[in-house]
Each structure stands twice: as structure tokens, then as C-alpha cells.
């Protein structure tokens, strides 16, 4: 047919987007089928998940396809090998867990969450008995597969003669609230920041992601009144989900480029968000505002980050890798070096080999600088997890960790919560920043830099 150049370009672009979606759906389907085949292989078997520890002390399960650190589907099919009777509090924790994984009222008080779960009895039974032919309430959840698994467990409990004696193998999760910001707030003794990330006890938990989303929306409204085109386009599109990943990862060193990509992925999932130019401009606008608002909310965290950045820059400029020791006496050495290309000649060809682990290579100054704050927080995070796991083992409390998300039986959630809080307080009662400053000064102060200026590390920020 006779069509103009502009229409032809639009058709080509539409075909490209459709082909991209088809490839993504195919990859997702193959991934799910593979996970299900692994789950089927181990069905009704007891198995263990060996873990690997990285250079910061964080631990990860080695199996790549099916583990508790995996996707919503992978988490939904896993149970503990040993069960425990629910006891007097277990049923309530199962109800709270249902509301948490569904997401609709996950920030309400515990009493309200339990009441909400009770009001969903019919939906729970329908989802458990007829997951694909019933009303499919579980499919409205933020984590649908974990919601379905919880519905099945709750249905079995409610149908039992004595819920307190019901033996449950089901894992219940206790998640930290933006754990990186929790550590920063504790390090800086930041009372306001601590309230935002639930380090201060309240009946209704605070939600830092929703708080940031509200501040960003207020900023957008002001810009929209000035007829800012992107601010007008973003009307109705700013939500907790859009900003959550960026807020969560800012403290772990995500750059504005990475944050923009995270927000763009969330915008793409919204209805009427198909224009790539608008998505790019909108995500660029939002990431700037999110960074600005977080800097205002967590001022002490920003100052600590800047101190760590500057310390690492000076250390790397002296040709040394940044090193520190965790409260568990684990030595941490940042491995980032400038890559070296080596040419390997054969009779047929020349091959350029890239090496990032050559000890003769100089430290990568920008990577050492940018990685120090998130890696230091990760090392504290892993220390807290290990301290918690050791006491859980001593107290006969089942413990599984997905970084800052701790899993246990419904019957032992209260005990896990006490241990988790006790170990966090014990960790941060130590003068962590003072000890870090003392270690860095003793090791690096006075070393000559590339500009023949001696390293002189500044004092840590005042609390």
C-alpha cells in the first residue's frame, strides 16, 4: 500500500517492539520450565543448598536455577525439611505472611493484617482449591506464586482439627526495611532516618518507598503547574513500585544511569507507556528527583557516603587497594584494578586476553571510590546476618537468609525477631566508624599519591 515515510518508520518500530516482546516471553517461558523440571526432580526429597561467600562476607546459594534467593516461583515451591507445630502464634504469622506477599495491605499494623487475612477466607480457599478455574484472587498479588503457596498452607491449617498442633514446613519471611539505609541511620545516629526505616518501634510500620514517592509526586505537581512537558506526561504514573528499586539500591552505589534504567523498566510495565522517548525522558527526570529527595531525607547517610568515597579516592591514588576488617574480623579487600590487555599469538591468529586480577595492575580509582560505601554496608549487613544465624543455631531456631530477608518457621518468628533486633543493636553499639577511621589512618595515612601528595584522610562525619 501507499504509505508515507513516517508511517513506514512507525510500522518498522512496532514490528521491532513486538519481536522484542516475543523473545522476552520465550526466554521467560524456558526459564520457568527449567526451574519446574529441577523442582520436579527433587520433589519430596531432602536436599541441601551449599553456599558461597564473596569478598565482603555476603553469602549466596551456589545452585543457579532453584534456590530461596531466586524468583517468586522458585521461592514458592520450597519448604523446610523439618516441620514444627504452629503453636499459639504460628497461625497469626501465616496470616501476616499472606498479606505481606500479596502486597495490598503489607504496610498496615499487624492487627489489621491479621483481620484482613481473616476477611479473605473465601478467597484463600478458592485460590487453594481452584487456582486456575476459580476467581484467581492470588493472581492479583505482588508475588502471586508465593501468595498461592501461602493460600494452600493456610487452607490446610484452617481445615485441621487443632491449628496449634498443625505441623508446618512452611517458611515465613521477615524482611528488613531498606536495610542499607537502616545501617546508615544507625551509623550516623540519625533519629529521623531511623524512624523512616523502622528502627523506631511504631504500631504502623513506616514505608520509606511510599514516602519518597509522595515527595517526588509533590515535586512533579509543582513542575506540571509550570507546564513542564515531562511532568505533565508523568501524571498518574509515579508510585511506590516505580521508585522502590532505585531507593533500595542508591545506598548500595547505584549510579544515576543505573537508577534511570531501573525506573524506565517500571514505566514500561504501565499502561499507555509505549513511547520510548517519553519513557527515557520521564525516567531521567524521576531519577534526578529521587536522588535529590533522598539526600534531603537521609542527610547523615549522604555525609558518611561522601567520607567513604573521598577516603577510597585518596587510598587508590596512592596505588593501594582499599581494605578494612569487619566486626567479625573478616578482612575485606576491594579487588578492582585497571584491566590489562595481553596479546596471545598463535600460528593462526592473535587473541587479546583481558585480565582484571593481575597484581601488577594499578587500582581502578573510580571503581575503588564508588564501591567503598556499598561494599562497607554489605560487610555490615553480612556481619549482622552471621551473628543472627549463630544465635538462631544455638537457640534451635531454623534460619535461612536472603541477605536482609530472614526465613524461619511460623512458630519461631517471634524468637527470630528478638534475636535479629538484639544482634543489630549489639553490632551498632560498637564504634564502627571510629574503628574504621582508626584502621584506615594507621594503614594509609602518609603514603605518597600519584601527584606526590601524602595521603591525609579526613575525620569521620560527626554524629
Image (cartoon, rainbow, N blue to C red):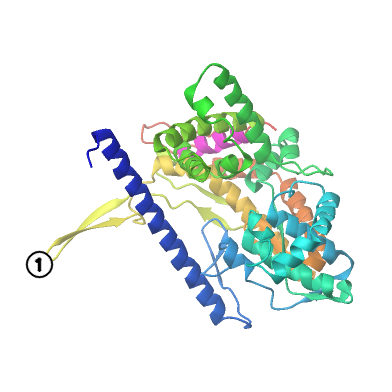
Look at the image and say whether residue 308 sits in the magenta stretch. Answer: yes
Q: Residue 30's spot in the image, x, y percent?
A: 44, 67
Report the number of numbered marks.
1
- As rendered, which of 118 and 284 lies closer to the eye? 118
| Residue that protrudes farthest toward the left in the picture | 347
Question: Residue 408 vs residue 222: left or right?
Answer: right
| Residue that protrudes farthest toward the front in the picture | 1
Where residue 171 sits, quadrant-wise, is bottom right
Label 1 Cα neighbours within 10 Å, binned few <14 / some 14-19 / many ≥20: few
Q: Main secondary structure of the magenta part?
A: helix
Question: Residue 358 vs residue 206: left or right?
Answer: left
Q: Residue 24's spot in the image, x, y percent?
A: 42, 57
Q: Which residues are magenta?
A: 301-315
The vertical placement of 190 against 228, above or below, is below
| Residue that protrudes farthest toward the bottom in the picture | 45
Residue at (81% x, 71% y) in the render:
157
Question: Residue 166 vs residue 330: left or right?
Answer: right
Question: Residue 407 vs residue 347: left or right?
Answer: right
Dot 1: element: loop
Residue at (84% x, 61% y) in the render:
92
Where residue 217 sits, quadrant-wise, is top right
- As rendered, which of 27 and 324 lies closer to the eye? 27
Q: Quadrant of the N terminus?
A: top left
Q: Which residue is mark 1?
A: 347
- As rendered, which of 91 and 348 lies closer to the eye? 91
Look at the image and say whether residue 337 sits in the magenta stretch. Answer: no
Residue 88 visible in the shown view: yes
Q: Residue 463's spot in the image, x, y percent?
A: 70, 33
Amino acid at each position: 500500500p501507499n504509505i508515507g515515510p513516517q508511517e513506514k518508520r512507525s510500522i518498522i518500530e512496532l514490528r521491532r517492539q513486538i519481536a522484542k516482546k516475543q523473545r522476552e516471553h520465550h526466554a521467560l517461558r524456558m526459564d520457568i520450565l527449567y526451574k519446574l523440571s529441577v523442582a520436579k526432580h527433587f520433589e519430596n526429597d531432602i536436599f541441601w543448598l551449599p553456599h558461597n561467600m564473596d569478598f565482603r562476607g555476603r553469602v549466596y546459594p551456589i545452585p543457579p536455577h532453584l534456590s530461596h534467593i531466586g524468583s517468586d516461583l522458585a521461592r514458592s515451591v520450597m519448604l523446610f525439611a523439618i516441620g514444627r507445630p504452629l503453636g499459639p502464634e504460628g497461625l497469626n504469622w501465616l496470616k501476616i505472611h499472606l498479606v505481606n506477599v500479596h502486597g495490598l495491605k503489607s504496610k498496615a499494623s499487624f492487627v489489621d493484617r491479621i483481620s484482613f487475612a481473616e476477611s479473605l477466607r473465601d478467597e484463600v480457599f478458592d485460590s487453594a482449591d481452584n487456582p486456575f478455574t476459580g476467581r484467581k484472587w492470588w493472581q492479583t498479588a505482588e508475588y502471586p506464586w508465593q501468595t498461592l503457596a501461602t493460600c494452600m498452607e493456610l487452607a490446610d491449617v484452617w481445615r485441621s482439627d487443632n491449628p496449634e498442633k498443625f505441623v508446618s514446613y512452611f517458611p515465613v519471611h521477615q524482611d528488613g526495611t531498606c536495610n542499607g539505609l537502616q545501617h546508615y541511620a544507625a551509623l550516623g545516629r540519625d533519629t529521623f532516618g531511623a524512624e523512616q526505616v523502622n528502627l523506631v518501634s511504631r504500631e504502623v510500620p513506616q514505608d520509606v518507598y511510599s514516602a519518597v514517592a509522595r515527595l517526588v509526586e509533590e515535586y512533579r505537581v509543582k513542575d506540571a503547574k509550570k507546564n513542564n512537558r515531562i511532568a505533565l506526561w508523568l501524571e498518574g504514573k509515579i508510585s511506590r513500585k516505580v521508585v522502590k528499586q532505585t531507593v533500595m539500591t542508591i545506598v548500595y552505589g547505584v549510579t544515576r544511569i543505573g537508577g534511570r534504567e531501573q525506573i524506565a523498566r517500571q514505566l514500561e510495565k504501565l499502561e499507555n507507556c509505549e513511547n520510548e522517548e517519553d519513557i527515557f525522558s520521564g525516567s531521567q527526570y524521576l531519577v534526578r528527583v529521587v536522588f535529590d529527595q533522598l539526600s534531603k531525607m537521609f542527610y547523615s547517610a549522604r555525609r558518611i557516603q561522601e567520607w567513604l568515597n573521598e577516603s577510597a579516592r585518596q587510598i587508590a591514588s596512592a596505588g593501594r587497594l582499599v581494605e578494612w576488617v569487619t566486626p567479625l574480623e573478616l578482612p575485606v579487600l576491594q579487588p578492582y584494578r585497571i584491566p590489562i590487555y595481553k596479546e596471545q599469538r598463535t600460528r593462526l591468529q592473535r587473541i587479546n586476553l583481558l585480565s582484571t586480577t593481575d597484581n601488577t595492575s594499578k587500582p581502578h580509582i573510580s571503581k575503588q571510590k564508588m564501591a567503598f560505601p556499598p561494599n562497607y554496608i554489605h560487610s555490615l549487613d553480612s556481619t549482622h546476618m552471621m551473628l543472627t544465624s549463630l544465635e538462631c543455631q544455638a537457640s534451635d531456631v531454623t534460619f535461612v537468609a536472603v541477605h536482609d530477608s530472614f526465613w524461619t518457621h511460623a512458630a519461631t518468628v517471634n524468637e527470630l525477631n528478638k534475636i535479629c533486633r538484639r544482634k543489630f543493636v549489639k553490632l551498632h553499639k560498637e564504634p564502627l566508624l571510629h574503628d574504621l577511621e582508626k584502621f584506615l589512618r594507621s594503614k594509609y595515612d602518609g603514603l605518597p599519591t600519584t601527584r606526590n601528595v601524602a595521603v591525609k584522610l579526613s575525620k569521620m562525619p560527626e554524629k
